[in-house]
Amino acid sequence: MDKLVIESEHIKIRKLKISDLSDFYFYRSNPEVTKYQGFDTYTIDQSKEFIESQLSVQFGKAGEWNQLGIENKQTGKLIGDCAIKLGEYDVRIAEVGITISHMEQNKGYGKESLVAILNFLFSIMDFHRVTEIVDVENVASIRLLESVGFVKEGHFIQNIFFNGKWGSEFQYAMLKNQWELITAMKS
Ligand SMILES: CC(C)(COP(=O)(O)OP(=O)(O)OC[C@H]1O[C@@H](n2cnc3c(N)ncnc32)[C@H](O)[C@@H]1OP(=O)(O)O)[C@@H](O)C(=O)NCCC(=O)NCCS
C-alpha cells in the first residue's frame, strides 16, 4: 500500500516527508518525549536519516515497522508520529505506538490518532488484534490506552534494561470484536 492515508476530524496520518524535518526534530530531540520510548533523543542528522529511511517503506510487510507522520489538518504541521508493526508470523496482528509533540500533548490528538488507527486496522484492513507495550511509569500512555478500551493482558517485571536500570512494562491489547462492541456502544 503505497499511498497510505488515515484521516479523521483534525488529523491526517500519512507518510513522513523530508519537509517534516524541522517539526520532527523539534519534538524527537526533547528528552521528555523520548523518556519512555525504545529510542534516545535524535540529532538533526539522525532525524533526517530516519525520515529518509521511511520514504521507501510500504505498509503490509510482515515484521516491519511503518513510521507515519501525524499532521494537523488545519495547519499542515507535523504534530507527532505513529508506528505500526505487522506481526512477523501473522500480518493480521499489529503492534502500535504513538508520539505526540510536547507542545501538542493533552489536546486529544493522541486519542484521535489511536482511534483512527484502530478503525483503519480493524474496519478497513480486517486485522484481528492490536497490541501496545508500555512502560509501567508512562502514565499518559496507559491512560490513553485505557480510555480507548485496551485491555491490560500482561505485566512484565524488570524485563528491559533501559536508561541505566531495569524497567517493567505492561502489554495492552484490543481485539477486532472488542473494538466493534466499543464502537457500536458509542453510536
Ligand atoms: C502518550 C501520548 C501519545 C498521549 O497523547 P496525548 O495527545 O497527550 O493524549 P490525549 O490528549 O489524546 O489524551 C488521552 C487520554 O490520556 C489522558 N492523558 C494525557 N496525558 C496525560 C498525562 N500526562 N497524565 C495523565 N493522563 C494523561 C487524557 O486526559 C486523556 O484521558 P481521557 O480520554 O480519559 O480524557 C503522549 O503523551 C506522548 O506522545 N508521550 C510521549 C511519547 C510516548 O511515551 N509514547 C508512548 C510510547 S509506548
Image (spheres, grey):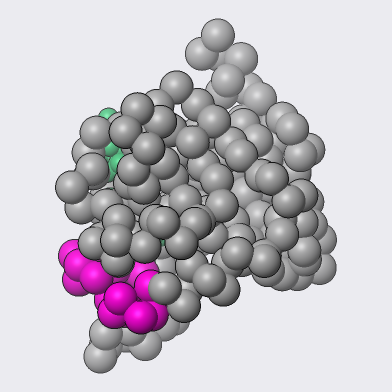
- Residue 25: percent from the left, percent from the top? 29, 66
The image quadrant of residue 168 is bottom left
- Which of 52 and 144 lies nearest the eye of the viewer? 52
- The residue range painted magenta reads 29-47
In the displayed structure, does residue 147 sit left or right of residue 52? left
Q: Quadrant of the C terminus?
A: top right
Residue at 24% in and 33% down: 107
Report the residue that reaches farthest toward the bottom.
Answer: 164
- Residue 3: percent from the left, percent from the top? 69, 45
- Residue 91: percent from the left, percent from the top? 79, 57
The image quadrant of residue 166 is bottom left
Q: In the picture shown, does residue 42 fall above or below 12?
A: below
Q: Is residue 30 rendered magenta in the image? A: yes
- Which of 18 and 108 lies nearest the eye of the viewer? 18
Report the residue that reaches farthest toward the front.
Answer: 19
Residue 30 visible in the displayed image: yes
- Residue 99: percent from the left, percent from the top? 37, 55
Q: In the picture shown, does residue 75 fall above or below 136?
A: above
Q: Is residue 117 rendered magenta in the image? A: no
Residue 96 visible in the displayed image: no
Instruction: Tell me which image quadrant ligand 1 sits in.
Output: top left
Residue at 43% in and 45% down: 70
- Which of 99 and 143 lies nearest the eye of the viewer? 99
Residue at 61% in and 39% down: 5
Residue at 50% in and 56% down: 16
